[in-house]
Image: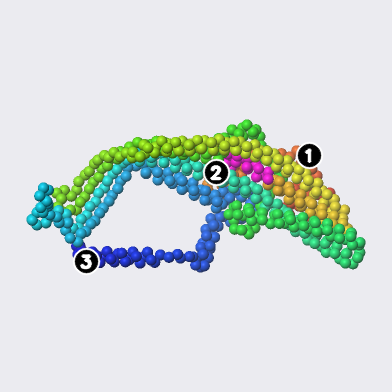
Amino acid sequence: MVLSASGARNLLASVSMVALLAACAVAPKPFTPEQLSQSAKDDRVDMFKSGEALTAPLTVSEAIARALKYNLDRRAKIMEEAQALGQTDIDRWDMLPRLVASGNFTSRSEPNATRSRDLYTQTTSSSNPTYSADRDNYTADLGLSWNVLDFGLSYFTAKQNADRALIASERKRKAVHTLVQDVRFAFWRAAAHQELMAEVGTAVSEAKVALERARTVERENLKAPSESLRYQKSLLETLRQLTAIQQELSTAEIELAALINAPPGTKLALEVPRDLKTPAWDLNLERMEELAFSGNADLREQGYLARVAADDTRKAIVRLFPGITFSASRNYDHNSFLMANHWYEAGAKLSWNLMNLISGPDAIKYAETNEDVAKARRLALRMAVLAQVHVSERQFRNSISQFDQSDELWKVDRRLFELSEARTANDAQGMLERVAGRASAIASALRRFQTYAQVEQAYARMQASIGHDLMPDNVASHDLRALSAAIALRLEAWGAAHAPSPAERAFSTAQGQSWRWLGQDDGTPSDAEGSGAQNRDLAQAPSR
């Protein structure tokens, strides 16, 4: 097809007008309320579509497995790692020669005709103009080129990206460590909510009834006003304590549901062990320091960052060298005036950016400074990890001590409540003592669960500080049940359960209870079980 001069001008004007109109048509376009609503619905479906339904009481290992499998933050870390690994695959291709296929089409409205001019006389030839190229011309070539300098830079870049993939893996490990700590802490707070809320509700109802009776006594002047007001004050203080416990437990299930990626408001049934056993820990601090220096996720990340900095120095040195490009191509030209329309080309080209020789020393110095900074950071982090190991070990020992004290206090408060319940079962004037005793026992039980949650969290933090991974390297299957079983085995292997002392076993046998929140259920009758009021309270409590 041959275009005339006017046709070419018209075509150019049309294309320019279309481009101008398209540019003017671009304007900000916010989302409509319908689009935002639909996007929220779609995202909500995507958030929870992959989770398996909860069909049985949730154990600690299954809660951790669900968090590792479905938690959205961990999914993001896995995708970041996959993205980093994908970059290493791309870098392999960057080290190969470039293979480029190109094509070109040109069309002129008039032939590219020329006349010749004499070099010495500067007179133009009077002969007719001539041309040696078609007005419509097609060219194509397939070329292979390889630059040695680019290969060297690509090689070190690929090594750096491989280290960045390992950095992403270490960050995923750290995210898993943090997630396990949060799940173990949230699980036991949710366990306290499950075991105590029924008793808290009973105690609140009883306290309100007692408070209403006290106000009636005050109105009828059955007691001295000061005595009646002090009685009401004690009841209100107890009611405030119970309300604080309700508020403390109200968010526990929501936090655990968020960690395992269950919809907020999901009613979680937890499988709470009858005995709360503290894990054993036999490693001394020297061995923990050795393990932390080799397995801590933060230290490993800094080690890979140091290798990235070292490769930056090598790249700065490589840039000082000249670049040699080898090329070979197969070419085609549609020009009918050529004797050969197809031909091969080969060549070599040397290029050297001399400015790199001037700026090279500064670039190398900067890269070496980065290496020194990376080393300083690594040393500082080693010191921080060393302190973290000692602090986490001390926190673990302290949390066990606090749990043991809370456990003993809970046993005493429980016995005091049993005695007051038996003594004041049929005494209306003793209701304050019963309510206060029940509230104190509930508070002690809550404190017991809270300190045990701190034990679990401190234990997981100590494991994370030395680089022990709860997530198995290989699982036979990717389904939730297999992952939960593997984690349960790893939890059991991490630390053997603390065996109770003979005195603790004797106490548990003598003081067995049927209340779920007391943590005992061996069927042994309590000392106060003969009381009618006590039997009524026990009947109201849910059985295990």
Q: What element carries label 2?
A: helix
Q: Name the residue under label 3.
A: 6
Q: Give the CA separation, mark 1 to mark 2.
A: 41 Å
Vertical order, 461 against 34 (above or below): above
Residue at 33%, 64% in the rendered image: 19
* Whole-percent x, y for residue 211 in the image: 82, 62
* Whole-percent x, y for residue 537 in the image: 80, 57
Could you tell me if the residues under marks 1 and 2 are in contact, i.e. CB atoms within 8 Å?
A: no
Q: Which of 115 and 543 is in front in this view?
A: 115
Q: Name the residue under label 1.
A: 503
User: Which numbered disc flags the more N-terminal residue, 3 or 2?
Assistant: 3
Q: In this view, does 22 lie to the left or right of 458?
A: left
Going by the picture, which residue comes out furthest to the front? 121
- Residue type at mark 2: give it: Arg
* Whole-percent x, y for residue 284 in the image: 65, 33
Q: Name the residue under label 2.
A: 173
Magenta region, residue range: 454-475
**Nearer the viewer's eye, disc 1 or disc 3?**
3
